[in-house]
Image: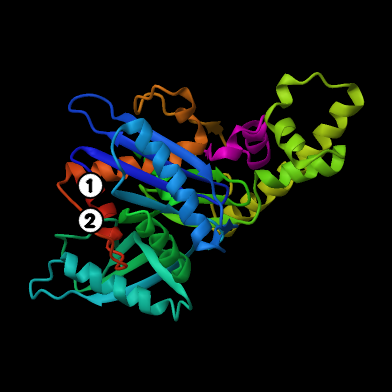
Amino acid sequence: MRNKTAVGIDIGSSQIKVVAMELANGSKPKILGYGSALSQGLKRGEIMDQRELAASLKNCLQKCQDSSGFPVEEAYLAVDGENLKSFRAKGVAIVSRADGEITEYDIERAIETAKGNLGQLMNREIIHAIAVSFKIDDNFQTQNPIGLKGMRLEADILFVTTLGRNLKSLIKALEINKVAVLKIISSPLASSRLLLSKTQKEVGAMLLDVGGTTMALSVFEEGVPISMEILPIGSDHISHDLAIGFQISLEEAENLKTNILNKNWGREEKRKLDEIIEARFSDIFELVDRHLRKIGRHGLLPSGVILTGGGANMPGLSEYAKKFLKLPSNIYLPREEYDSSDESLYLPQWSSAIGLCFWAMDDLREGKRFAFSPRPSFVLKWLRTLLP
């Protein structure tokens, strides 16, 4: 990463996206270059052919270099797909200092205990360890215990994991293209940096990233993510339903899906279309609602649902989300957050790659530079965002 520039690489199940962004003093960040390509060698987020993936990355990186004028040598990487899983666990540490003041060392020990309570994570790597809350001496709850006093510290931690083999293959595919990975962030959290305000995260919001084959659901409350779930359904399923229902090719179905409002429909055709789409929308939001009920947040997110990802462009999706989940629902296009000469870069499918750049910008402002390490120290970054 060059001085005052950041690069984000989002390797999705359908497409790879690369964005290079410049941090300008006193003005909005500006996109310098970008590239996209089909995700060859991937199936539902799992790497099937590393050479094909490396070739797709090369194509994408070259497009970004051509438009920005400089080569991509370092980048932040987003991971998503069905391999992404989250777990909640609690851990306890006895405060180490004689005067009872809680330090980062105590937090790290509590996190390690929570990690141990997860049991054996077969074939999985932890990429985030995020503090949902802390409890001091079983009676005082806080999100930032540093500097407070007590004898016993309990941490409630959200661990986000991915398949270790997949992660190594992703890094290797980038190394083949001479790109060093500075930091790895789950795609839902990368998008949340761009799309959710501090107020939304504080009062309660859900970010729903609708991909081709999966949906990533992230729930935020009191400033932090409290749950993350990958659902095995996406916008490609609607294309398949349309192909079967209208007896057309998948290519025609995909075009139909994205141009519903531009087509003149006969009465029976429109009735059939509505039935097909509503049935699949119902499947999608039933899974979402089931998860919200499971975590006790059904109907309890004042900031509602924010839709993103390529599937969010589906006409009627936001309205159906509002109707089914009984929550506010919208698609946020972040035109005020950064400058781009290409209007398409404000569309939802770019939110993860651009969100990565904003994460990198935050680190640059704090004077940090990273070389990837599997040790999840991410929790401390979340804590620092809570400080005045």
Camera-side residue of 307 and 41? 41
Amino acid type at mark 1: Asp
Query: Is residue 185 visible to the viewer in this orientation of the structure?
Result: yes
Camera-side residue of 180 and 191? 180
101 with respect to 163 (left or right) = left
Mark 2 vs mark 1: in front: 2
Query: Is residue 195 visible to the viewer in this orientation of the structure?
Result: no
Q: CA distance from mark 2 to mark 1?
A: 9 Å
Magenta highlight range: 303-326
On the image, numbered disc 1 is attached to which residue? 363
- Give me the disc on residue 15: none
Q: Residue furthest right?
A: 268
Q: Where in the figure is residue 348, as x and y percent of width and height? A: 51, 35
Q: Alpha-carbon neighbours of circle 1 within 10 Å: few (<14), some, or many (≥20)? A: some
Residue 191 position (above or below residue 21): below
Q: Is-magenta flag for residue 83?
A: no
Mark 2 secondary-structure assignment: loop
Camera-side residue of 353 and 206? 353
On the image, numbered disc 2 is attached to which residue? 370
- Mark 2 touches mark 1? (CB < 8 Å): yes
Residue at 49% in and 27% down = 344
Q: Where in the figure is residue 294, as x and y percent of width and height? A: 58, 59
Report the number of numbered marks: 2
135 with respect to 62 (left or right) = left
